[in-house]
């Protein structure tokens, strides 16, 4: 799979930004699952948040306290439209534990991508 997309009717390559919020210990699994797809770069941010689980209760030195924001990792990957479904499947398979808090995936359109060093645009910049 080359990851190169064909231009749309206007002659533009459509791209998407795939954002995944996952458990930190699943990061290496997700990265390894994306490599065979030809994904050559991604951004990772350590974040804190909560979803339906509303945090968790922990015990420290005999005292119980509530942790409202849990550590998560946000992965951002800009991909050609043709690869979006494969990227989503790879993340779903690699990040899944079956337990609450596995995370979410969001897909957003990308209007333009430009590589600063070479000034390449579109999926050539990815």
Image (spheres, rainbow, N blue to C red):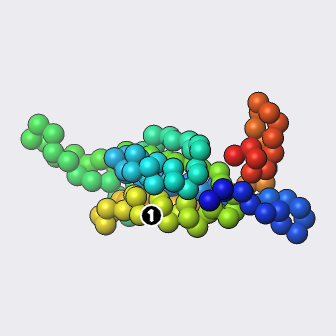
Residue at the extreme left of the image, as rendered: 62
> Dot 1, how many residues are within 10 Å of its Cα: few (below 14), some (14-19), or many (20+)?
some
For the point 56% across and 64% down, the residue is: 86
Q: For the point 81% across and 45% down, which residue is it?
A: 121
Q: Closest to the observer: 48 or 12?
A: 12
Q: Is residue 11 visible?
A: yes
**How far from the left and from the top, in percent, is residue 8?**
83, 66
The residue identified by callout 1 is 92
The N terminus, quarter of image:
bottom right
Image quarter of residue 62 = top left
Residue 71 location, x and y as percent?
Answer: 37, 45
- Residue occupying the point 72% across, 57% down: 4
Q: Name the foreground residue: 12 vs 35.
A: 35
Is 53 placed left or right of 126 in the picture?
left
Secondary structure state at the residue bearing disc 1 = helix
Give the farthest residue toward the right.
10
Of residues 57 and 35, the one drawn nearer to the viewer in this rendering: 35
In front here: 24 or 115?
115
């Amino acid at each position: 799979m080359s990851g190169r997309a064909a231009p749309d009717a206007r002659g533009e390559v459509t791209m998407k930004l795939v954002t995944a919020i996952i458990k930190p210990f699943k990061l290496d699994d997700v990265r390894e699952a994306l490599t065979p797809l030809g994904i050559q770069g991604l951004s990772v941010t350590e974040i804190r948040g909560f979803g339906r689980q509303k945090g968790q209760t922990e015990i420290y030195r005999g005292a119980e306290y509530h942790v409202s924001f849990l550590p998560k990792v946000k992965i951002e990957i800009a991909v050609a439209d043709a690869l979006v479904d494969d990227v989503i499947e790879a993340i779903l398979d690699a990040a899944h534990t079956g337990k609450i808090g596995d995370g979410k995936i969001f897909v957003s359109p990308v209007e333009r991508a430009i590589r600063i060093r070479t000034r390449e645009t579109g999926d050539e910049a990815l």
